[in-house]
């Protein structure tokens, strides 16, 4: 993963300051991407390695066919011994299709290529028990995280704090994505000499997030972290238990409410009665249809709505448990 295309373009164009207008930013990115890739090619060539540029937007992850195309392209580059230099496509990306941060994009790419380890380099040694910039010696580095609990997530700092805005929040979000795909993840200090060598030598550096023992299939990874969510469905305790522990499909009887203007084939979050999102899936029915059949037994749905051919609102094969 690499960023810096706009900054390189600003310098390459001889501009005095970073532009603020989107077309000018896109022009700077266009010039900068070539300069950036040339720099990488020069550096990697010293080690007889070739590089290839891969530019992505959310469109390439959200849409299933583009997701598969991106995965195939990256896998082929690696099979050919080429190092992919991945960046968000700042030339064409607008707010609606931007990832917003390279940490999330890096985790998605790591899952795409089924990487063993993802390393996110920062200006801090890893995840601490509190903000080391404020608490100093009271802050202890956490060397390993086996489960990203709410308490762990809270250590990233709130919105608007220096620690939070420094990128730890997005790094924890990236860790959630990585470990679901059986990808271990390090947060480490990129300013330390030989940090990547130390990580590969398994020295005690940074914070390591342990991958789940059982990963998700590529299809379910796409559902969980690639496809955009268009609404929510709230279920009762019985349905939540059946989904989490029983591995069941979501039936109309367990649904108590829904929100959003989703259609059949869209992705929706699934909440429990306390409002906690615990799953995500591809719905067979629209918001209007779910509103009609919520709370009904399957036999009642078939008798009252004979055109509704699917017994499940969300089939278990299109459902991912997130907590």
Image: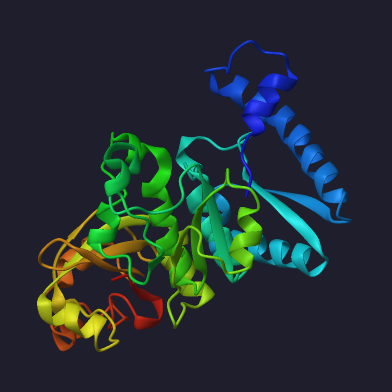
Q: Residue 169: tell me if it is visible.
A: yes
Horizontal placement of 243 versus 177: left or right? Answer: left
Most extreme residue toward the top is: 16
Along the line of sight, the residue nearer the viewer: 214 or 70: 214
Colour scheme of the rendered structure: rainbow
Figure check: 9 above or below 224: above
State the image quarter where residue 301 is shown.
Answer: bottom left
Figure check: 133 above or below 16: below
Q: How many marks?
A: 0
Horizontal placement of 141 versus 2: left or right? Answer: left
Horizontal placement of 220 versus 193: left or right? Answer: left
Q: Residue 291, position in %: x, y?
A: 17, 64
Q: Residue at left 53%, top 59%?
A: 108
Q: Residue 145, position in %: x, y?
A: 37, 67
State the image quarter where residue 9 is shown.
Answer: top right
Q: Residue 164, position in %: x, y?
A: 33, 41
Q: Residue 65: tell me if it is visible.
A: no
Along the line of sight, the residue nearer the viewer: 306 or 95: 95
State the image quarter where residue 3 is shown.
Answer: top right
Q: Residue at left 72%, top 55%?
A: 84
Q: Residue at left 28%, top 81%?
A: 312
Quadrant (top left, top right, bottom left, bottom right) of the C terminus: bottom left
Q: Residue 192, position in %: x, y?
A: 58, 47
Q: Residue at left 55%, top 23%?
A: 22
């Amino acid at each position: 993963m690499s960023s810096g295309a706009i900054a390189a373009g600003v310098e390459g164009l001889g501009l005095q300051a970073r532009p603020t207008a989107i077309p000018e930013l896109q022009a700077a990115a266009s010039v900068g991407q070539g300069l950036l890739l040339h720099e990488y090619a020069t550096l990697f060539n010293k080690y007889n390695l070739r590089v290839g540029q891969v530019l992505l937007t959310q469109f390439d992850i959200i849409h299933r066919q583009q997701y598969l195309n991106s995965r195939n392209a990256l896998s082929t580059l690696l099979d050919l011994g080429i190092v992919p230099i991945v960046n968000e496509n700042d030339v064409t990306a607008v707010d609606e299709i931007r990832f917003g941060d390279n940490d999330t994009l890096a985790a998605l790419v790591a899952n795409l290529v089924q990487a063993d380890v993802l390393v996110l380099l920062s200006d801090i040694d890893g995840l601490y028990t509190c903000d080391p910039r404020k608490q100093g010696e009271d802050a202890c580095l956490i060397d390993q995280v086996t489960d990203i609990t709410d308490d762990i997530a809270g250590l990233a700092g709130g919105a608007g704090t220096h620690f939070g805005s420094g990128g730890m929040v997005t790094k924890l979000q990236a860790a959630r994505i990585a470990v679901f795909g059986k990808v271990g993840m390090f947060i480490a200090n990129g300013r330390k000499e030989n940090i990547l060598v130390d990580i590969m030598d398994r020295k005690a550096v940074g914070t390591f997030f342990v991958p789940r023992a059982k990963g998700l299939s590529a299809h379910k990874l796409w559902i969980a972290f690639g496809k955009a969510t268009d609404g929510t469905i709230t279920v009762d305790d019985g349905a939540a238990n059946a989904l989490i522990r029983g591995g069941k499909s979501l039936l109309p009887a367990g649904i108590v409410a829904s929100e959003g203007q989703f259609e059949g084939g869209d992705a929706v979050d699934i909440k429990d009665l306390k409002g906690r999102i615990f799953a995500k899936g591809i719905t067979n029915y629209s918001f209007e249809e779910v509103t009609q059949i919520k709370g009904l037994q399957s036999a009642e749905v078939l008798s009252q709505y004979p055109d509704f051919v699917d017994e499940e609102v969300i089939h278990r094969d299109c459902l991912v448990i997130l907590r």
